[in-house]
Amino acid sequence: CLPRALPLVFSRPQSQNHRPRSALDSLRRSQWASPVSSGRPGPSQRRRLHTHKVSDAEIAALARQHQHPLSLTDLVRHGRPPLSSESLLTSANFALSLLPVRLAHRIQALRNLPYIVVTNPNISRIYNNYIHSLSILLPYLHASRDGRPISSLDDEVLFTNVLAELVQTHTDTIPILAKGFLECRRYISPTEVTRFLDQHLRARIGTRLIAEQHIALHFSSQPHFDPPASPTPCPEHPSYIGVIDTVLKPADIIESCAGFVADICELRYGVRPQLCIDGEPDTTFAFVPMHLEYIVTELLKNAFRATVENKSREPVIVTIAPEPPLRQPPYSDPPTAVARPSEDDDRGAIAPLDDNAPGVTIRIRDRGGGIPPDVAPSIWSYSFTTFSDNPDDFPGSGSGSDIGLGAIASASTGGSSIAGLGYGLPLSRAYAEYFGGGIAVQSLYGWGTDVYLRLKGVGLIDR
Ligand code: ADP
Ligand code: MG
């Protein structure tokens, strides 16, 4: 079951250098750290994860398969309550039908990097993580009985453990890749790095979402299951379908994230910038809370940092405006699920369920002096930052440089720094665009910055 409206806990930093650690995270972590239970505690389910040596031929065959654009309809369809055993099995088989192909595409993309880059210990660690994940999924693909690899609830429990392991394996990908590409910068151009990372990290969003959705459905099918070591009781949350909250209130997430970002700001600068929420704070829409948390945290980090470094006392103002569903012109066909262009990369792998779903626009306005014109062209490049790790450099920023080792170190150890990785804007944009939204930055140099975050809600119409 998925907790909703549980208080966000900020005492311990989240491991990906971006999100506050929520009760949901804690719950997930405790679930992932321990074997998934079918209600009957399995003695050594984790040890029963089989691996399969992955051959080059298998990777090539999987990577040749087209990655079909996937509608969120599919993810939501299996999760509509009441969740039957049958829909749980369908959801598991659905995840299995997608993940090996996606992993194989990523393995091929990593192999296509210059050889000297792939041999870098950090990049090869990521490569090996993908090989490992494929090796624990393939036994299921090969075990097809009657064309249905996961055919019993016991299989489903074991498979959910495999998904949990997959998510866990790839948790620290971002700081590891950041370090790897920093070490290889002599051998690969920034444009190539940005192209690779943009595709790779967008693909990762989809892969995690598929796995997390099934894991969440697994637990929501067991409302009385008490995860071991969970710090909070686990109430039922009828507003969730898997990892999607159908009545997500952005104002709640913004407030929580602002508290977290103010904490790390205070640690770094000794100052807590103020935040005001205006517009229509009661707005709700259907979205993935983890994604909104990631984006809002990164945008607030930038706004707070600029505010403090510019010695401004003005609050950061966040305006929330609901976007009503598009009006259908008279006599038009009913809305259809939108598949984005079927490029064979992961950008179009998940499309909004319904192009007509209500969304939200959030404007984050700071008086932090804006973005210098010479910096502006680079802000969307992965690993570009003007942050300096050296506290003596504050206030004022560098003229634009590569990622700071301090930010990487802090991200790798589960900490969070106000800036320095240079991934905040490009990765936030990847998250926003995943479901058809976007981010636009408007800087008034010498004055401040407006960031417009537009998010399309996940449509929930059955088709
Ligand atoms: P990081 O925060 O790690 O530097 P980001 O991708 O979040 O990486 O931002 C890249 C750069 O864009 C920042 O280093 C900063 O120079 C600039 N920037 C982003 N947001 C703002 C803002 N609100 N005000 C001023 N500069 C900003
Ligand atoms: Mg940032």
Image (cartoon, helix red, strand yellow):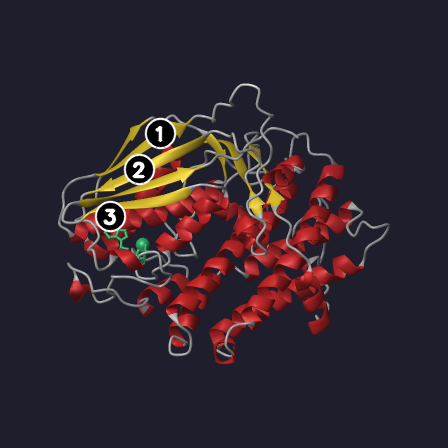
Residue 362 is at least partly visible in this image? yes
**Residue 15, percent from left and from top:** 43, 57
Residue hosting label 2:
363
Say what amino acid the circle numbered 1 marks.
Ala
Q: Secondary structure at mark 2?
A: strand
> Is the residue indicated by label 2 positioned so its CB lies within 8 Å of ligand 1?
no
Say what amino acid the circle numbered 3 marks.
Phe
Screen quadrant of the N terminus: top right
Tag on residue 304? 3
Q: Using a 10 Å C-alpha cutoff, classify the residue at mark 2 as few (fewer than 14 neighbours), some (14 to 19) or many (20 or more).
A: many
At x 41%, y 33%, the residue is: 360
Say what amino acid the circle numbered 2 marks.
Arg
Which badge, 2 or 3, is on the more N-terminal residue? 3
Q: CA distance from mark 1 to mark 3?
A: 21 Å
Residue at the limit of the structure toward the right, as seen here: 146
Q: Secondary structure at mark 3?
A: helix
Nearer the observer: mark 2 or 3; the answer is 2
Residue hosting label 1:
321
**Residue 173, percent from left and from top:** 48, 63
Which badge, 1 or 3, is on the more N-terminal residue? 3
Foreground pick, 429 / 244: 429
Q: Using a 10 Å C-alpha cutoff, classify the residue at mark 3 as few (fewer than 14 neighbours), some (14 to 19) or many (20 or more).
A: many
